[in-house]
Image (cartoon, rainbow, N blue to C red):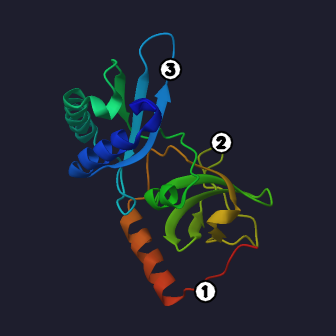
Amino acid sequence: MSALEDQTILRETATRVLDAHGLVLEDVEIRRGGGMPQVRLVVDLPEDQLGSVDLDTVADASRTLSEAVDADDAVLGSTPVLLEVTTPGVDRELTQPRHFRRSRGRLLALTVADGTSYRARLLAVHGEELHLRQEPGRDDRGRPVKLPPGTIERPVIPIADVRTARVEVEFDPPADLAQLLADAETTIADHPTAQKES
């Protein structure tokens, strides 16, 4: 089995290099076409950190990783390979608990098992549950849209019930976002059995 097929040494090497740069390995994608094989490493910040990955950090990690690959044929083999280090795109589907933990504070578009759709800010991930604040957006005149009467403003949804979830691009997040997240954590600690969306 070739180094490209096995990936064990590649993953070990990438994990060691990325860890030194404060990054984690999210995924390894290998593409074989008519030319040189392409190895794409998707990296992210650890799940306990908020914000976006600094592109200078990604570039530094990519250089270090390229040097490690060049120095040891056991990582990717002796055949030339195009190595790319990148971050998850904004259109990434959120499928794992760690994806949701990394998305705290972000505005999400979610659909759950019963077909209900939400446009909501992820305030916290507690165990296997998402604590959300619904934000329905604005109408065509720029006025805030109100939630229908009887709607739970802050639903709690089990991750297992989520069928699709993506981060929405947002150009003006709330100025008090850090306080919103801190308040959510305090509320969860004080009231661990918050009302759940049925």
Q: Determine whether, in the image, residue 138 is placed left or right of residue 175.
A: right
Q: Quadrant of the C terminus?
A: bottom right
User: Which residue carries the number 1 mark?
Assistant: 193
Image disc number at residue 122: none
Query: On residue 140, which mark appears?
Result: 2
Judged by depth in the image, the label closer to the viewer, 1 or 2, is: 1
Q: Picture quarter containing residue 174?
A: bottom left
Among the 4 quarters of the image, the one containing residue 183: bottom left
What is the distance, in whole Å, between disc 1 and disc 2 at their CAs? 37 Å
Q: What's the residue type where badge 3 is placed?
A: Arg
Looking at marks 3 and 1 on the same chain, the residue that comes earlier in the sequence is marked by 3
Which secondary structure, mark 2? loop
- Left or right, 151 with reference to 100: right
- Taking 155 as reference, is 13 above or below it? above
> Given this view, does label 3 or label 2 mark the residue nearer the observer?
3
Name the residue nearer the viewer: 105 or 58.
58
Amino acid bearing label 1: Thr
**In the image, what residue occupies the spot 49% across and 41% down?**
90
Which one is nearer the viewer's eye here, 116 or 37? Answer: 37
Residue 187 percent across, percent down from the top left: 49, 82
Residue designated by label 3: 32
Picture coordinates of residue 146, whole percent (x, y) = 67, 61
Whole-angstrom CA distance, mark 3 to mark 1, is 50 Å
- Whole-percent x, y for residue 99 in the image: 50, 55
Please say whether residue 176 is visible from this viewpoint: no
Q: Residues within 10 Å of mark 2 (few under 14, many from 20)?
A: few
Spatial CA span between label 3 and label 2:
46 Å
Three-letter code, disc 2: Asp
Q: Earlier in the sequence, mark 1 or mark 2?
A: 2
Name the residue rendered at 27%, 46% in the picture: 18
Of mark 3 and mark 2, the one earlier in the sequence is 3
